[in-house]
Structures are given as C-alpha cells and as structure tokens.
Image (cartoon, rainbow, N blue to C red):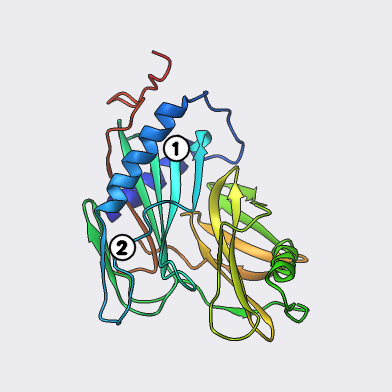
Amino acid sequence: MVSTYTRFVGILLMTGAVVCAEEPGKTVSDELTMKRYQLMEKRMSAVRVTSSEEGFPMAFESKPIFRYTDPARQYVAAAIWKLGAEGRPKAFMTTELHRSYRGQPRIVYEYLSLTPLKFAAVGGDVAWRPTASAVEFQPIPGAPTPEATPQRRLLQMRALAKQFAGKETVGNERCELRLLPQPIDRYTPSTADRADGAMFLQTYGTNPEIALFIESDGQSWTFAAGRLAGASRIDLTIEGKTVWEGAPVNYALTSPYTASNSPADIPGISPDGAEIINK
C-alpha cells in the first residue's frame, strides 16, 4: 500500500491536482456527511494497537478530534484520530476520503508517531509499526514563564502558536499555511505543577499540514512539530527564521510519519469517482 501512496502523491503533483488555490465544494447533506464519517469510524474501529509497554493504549479513540474536507484535493470528508486519552497522545492518524484516485474512490491514511516506544497498529486495511517518534521538542525563544491557571496558560499557548508561520512546497508552488486559532487537543504532559500542552494545526484551507505542539514542563515552554502532508518541503518559521523543517518522507511501514491508501465505497460517490449527492 505504501508504494501505491508514493505513486499517488507523484501523480497528483504531476497532474496539478494538488494546488495551493482553494476550490469551492458542493453542499453536502447532513445525512451524507454522517454516513461518510461512519465509514471512517468503521475503518478505525478495526485497528488494534499492541505494545510491550505496560499501560499502552490498545486502540485509537472512537471519535475523531478534528473533521475537515479539502475539495481542491478531492477529499470529500476527513478526520484526525488520536491514540491515548491521557497525557500527550502516543500517535495520530488521519483518514481522508478521496473521491477518485486511479479511477476509483479510496481512503487515504496518514500516520504520525509521537513516542519513541515501539508499537503496532494493525487491522482492516491498516498496518503500521513505527520504531521512533516523528517529533522532537525544543525551547521557544523568548517564551514567558508558564502562568498559574489553566485558563491563562491556554492564552499563553495560543499567543505562542501565533508566532509560527508555516509553508509547504507542492509541485513548483510554495504555499502559505494558516494557523487555526484554537487547539484541537489539550493535555497534561507530566505531573509537574503548571504542566500543560496543546496541539495546534497549520492548515491548507482546513486540511492539516503541520501538527504544532506547545508544551510546558512547569518551568518553561517548548514546541515540536510533525508533518501531516507529503509535501516535498514543509517548515515553520518565527520572525522569518526557520525553526523546524519536516524530514524527507520515507513511506515505509516502520516510519514515524508515513501513509497508505485502499479502496473505499464512499457514500455519495460513484465507483468511477463522480459525485452523485444531488441525484
């Protein structure tokens, strides 16, 4: 599946199907939207997680923490799912329903490991066994001391996240990303007093391209970032200075960031990829 996804990205780049300009999408009924998310929930419910680490979560959360679409890239429904309800999540997966790839509807998965612990996520059409973490935390220059209350720390994290500017290169075009102002996940990374953490998104439209983590250990603020895109170049800057650049993608089942895809019977989409929502 991985080699297929690599070809998939290449084909999109060569044909110009992946672009920086956003395209308007058709209005989709609530019922059809629900059916599409139910399809993704069913696929995710088949994934089982195993690890030799005691207490490691055995499944991804049953509901997504973020939902989105991307008409320009032909994703009619998509979502982010996290592994681990307590503390910093161990991993994230995205599910994206692609209207037509190689002449048929498909579901595209992206995988992002946030832990150095080895684990396996296998089931249905998913088989991922990362051997490392895709993220590394580093200090945020000039960050203030963490505030005493969760409410004020959230304000600090939002302000810190706004310092980061994201960009990606798609084909020959350099795309500006935008920060969603509210975090999509909030967690406590340790038992230290004033420990706090949140995950923000740098997006193309509403499509996540960079996962940005802001954390406090009680004494200072750090950040880490992980790619959620196969762009040839993707990075974050603060005041024009590059502070993070996504590592080159290696589409292997053991990679901390990778992707795969498989056929899917998408509600409202015909077998040849045509939209039938208005019929």
- How far across and down, in percent of the image, does residue 42 sit? 28, 45
Q: Is residue 17 visible?
A: yes
Using the image, determine if residue 236 lies above or below residue 79: below
Give the quarter of the image for residue 194.
bottom right
Query: Camera-side residue: 123 or 166?
Result: 123
* Residue at image point 23% right, 51% down: 125
Q: Gap in Å between the C-alphas at discs 2 and 1?
A: 25 Å
Picture quarter with the C terminus? top left
Using the image, determine if residue 77 lies above or below residue 92: above
Q: How busy is the neighbourhood of tag 2: few (under 14 within 10 Å), some, or many (20 plus)? A: some
Q: Is residue 99 visible?
A: no
Give the mark nearest the N terminus, 2 or 1.
2
- How far across and down, in percent of the image, does residue 254 sit? 30, 69
Q: What amino acid is at disc 2?
A: Ala
In the image, 272: left or right of 242?
left
Q: Which residue is mark 2?
A: 59
* Residue at image point 21% right, 52% down: 124
* Residue at image point 76% right, 82% down: 145
Residue 75, which numbered label?
A: 1
Q: How many numbered marks have been drawn onto this rendered protein structure?
A: 2
In the image, 230: left or right of 213?
left
Q: Considering the numbered disc 1 on the image, is that residue within a helix, a strand or a loop?
A: strand
- How far across and down, in percent of the image, does residue 264 sit? 28, 37
Q: Considering the numbered disc 2 on the image, is that residue within a helix, a strand or a loop?
A: loop
Query: Camera-side residue: 38 or 141?
Result: 38
Give the quarter of the image for residue 36.
top left
* Residue at image point 29% right, 67% down: 58
- How far across and down, in percent of the image, does residue 10 sit? 40, 47
Please name which of the two marks, 2 or 1, marks the residue nearer to the observer: 2
Query: Camera-side residue: 64 or 250?
Result: 64
Q: What amino acid is at disc 1?
A: Tyr
